[in-house]
Image (spheres, coloured by chain):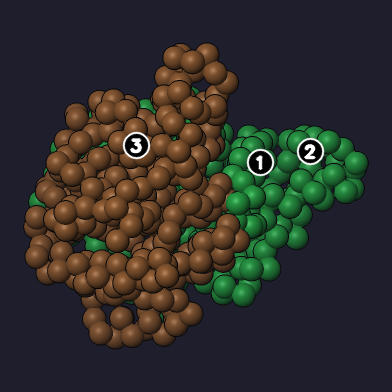
Chain colours: A green, B brown
């Protein structure tokens, strides 16, 4: 199977980051090389991957690449070609900007450096370009953990992904966000849009969500897990604390792989 | 007590919107006039206030005010003075832009209209200006429900508020977001920063949060409520479904009022 890029989206707090980080471990255990991109200015996937906060603070964000490119080339911001090839490969991303964890690499978009200094539009432009040009080898997977809500779809940060996954929890506001994301994602040309139902507490809730979301392709359901909820408080890695949760996500990954293979033909 | 403005901030999914909407009802039952501002481009406070999705879709967002001002005055975007006075009062905000619910008015910032059309920076600039100039009468309260995460602090959208409330749930990522918000909020000159602990499931969790957040002023604790969780799924108004939750938030409001009064002297 060729390499592919996916983005994880949804309302705040639905479990995007937990799912993105655990999917990274699942693909790694499947012998894939995984590039995880934290596209939230309030980056927080590091802990899900077992990277300590101190280690996380040492990661240079993607936004700094711009400076480096300028320093080394004197080129205008936005010009590529020296540090990155015009069509960069995952291996071309300098180690300085990645945290490496066996077969997983973590890139961080960059945060708000100081209050009142402005938006993170430039960071989104840089990330969008990087994602568009990144050429993947066989067995490479890119997982983007998007910021909560819908603004990233105005910015089209994830326009180059093969599939957009929307995480939905049992709640009308989460469902409404899914519909808004679907509409906006269609407008930036994303055709492969899938749903993961998360934190489901009963068959009744699952049925209600499926009825409301009958216009979507649903990859599968993850039941609410107290172990996963507690993992955030105790700084444990979700992938290691709950086998049932991991198995549910493995089933979802199998469904996703089938959809991705279909894209090839 | 003079009028005041507060903003509710925090990681996605911690309960900002539920708390903001319920606070609005609590202040209303206290005979205050309340202006609720949904500052999230993925606006969703309407349902918490009991406004149906169809009614919500008819609300003209603040971002449209710009067009109206231009149409009526031919003035450059960003110029005030005709439709709004230079120092507008809550009553000056045209009814067209508000949904009225007894003593509560709801304003919506505006969303991403089409995928790929850009960020919501202009909407944030307009909202920031409106909030800065808004003069409150006695007994008027403005509650801003901020977008998840930290980008709004780069934009300083809420720089004119009297108090910033950060909602924290039991989780390290929510705690880290609180620290990031505190740092950035300090940099835009916000001095009154308070914490509400939400969705707490045990005394142990409460103690853990209080230890981690000892640098903050904590207004109070709201315990996890299954009724409140279900209210989102069944489209019920949180203020009406759980008396214990409302009482906990009333206690928090009492604490907040004391802090606000202190600001006066």
Question: Which residue appears at 54% of the width and 41% of the height?
Answer: A4
Q: Secondary structure at mark 3?
A: strand
Which residue is under mark 1? A122
For disc 1, the neighbor class at 10 Å (few under 14, some 14 to 19, many from 20) is some
Check the image and report above or below for B4 versus A177. Answer: below
Q: Secondary structure at mark 1?
A: helix
- Foreground disc of the pair 3, 2: 3
Q: Chain of mark 3?
A: B
For the residues beneath circles 1 and 2, the answer to whether they share a chain is yes
Question: Which residue appears at 33% of the width and 61% of the height?
Answer: B14
Res A220 visible? no
Mark 1 or 2 closer to N-term? 2
Q: Which mark is residue A166?
A: none
Separation (CA) of disc 3 from disc 2 = 35 Å
Q: Is residue A59 left or right of residue B113?
A: right
Q: Position of residue B104 (x, y in %)?
A: 21, 44
Which residue is under mark 2? A77
């Amino acid at each position: 199977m060729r390499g592919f890029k996916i983005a994880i989206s949804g309302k705040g707090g639905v479990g995007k980051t937990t799912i993105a980080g655990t999917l990274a471990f699942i693909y790694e255990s499947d012998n894939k090389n995984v590039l995880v991109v934290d596209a939230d200015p309030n980056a927080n996937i590091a802990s899900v991957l077992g990277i300590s906060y101190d280690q996380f603070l040492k990661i240079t964000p993607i936004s700094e690449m711009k400076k480096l490119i300028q320093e080394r080339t004197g080129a205008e911001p936005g010009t590529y070609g020296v540090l990155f090839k015009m069509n960069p490969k995952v291996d071309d991303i300098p180690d300085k900007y990645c945290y490496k964890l066996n077969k997983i690499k973590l890139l961080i978009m960059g945060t708000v450096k100081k209050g009142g200094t402005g938006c993170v539009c430039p960071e989104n432009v840089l990330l969008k370009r990087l994602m568009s040009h990144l050429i993947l080898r066989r067995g490479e997977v890119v997982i983007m953990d998007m910021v909560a809500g819908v603004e990233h779809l105005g910015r089209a940060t994830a326009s180059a992904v093969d599939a957009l996954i929307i995480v939905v929890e049992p709640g009308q506001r989460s469902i409404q966000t899914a519909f808004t994301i679907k509409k906006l994602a269609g407008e930036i040309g994303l055709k492969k849009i899938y749903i993961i139902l998360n934190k489901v507490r009963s068959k009744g809730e699952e049925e209600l969500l499926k009825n409301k979301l009958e216009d979507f392709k649903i990859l599968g359901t993850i039941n609410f897990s107290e172990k996963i909820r507690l993992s955030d408080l105790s700084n444990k890695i979700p992938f290691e604390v709950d086998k049932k949760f991991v198995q549910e996500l493995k089933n979802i990954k199998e469904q996703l792989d089938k959809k991705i293979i279909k894209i090839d033909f």
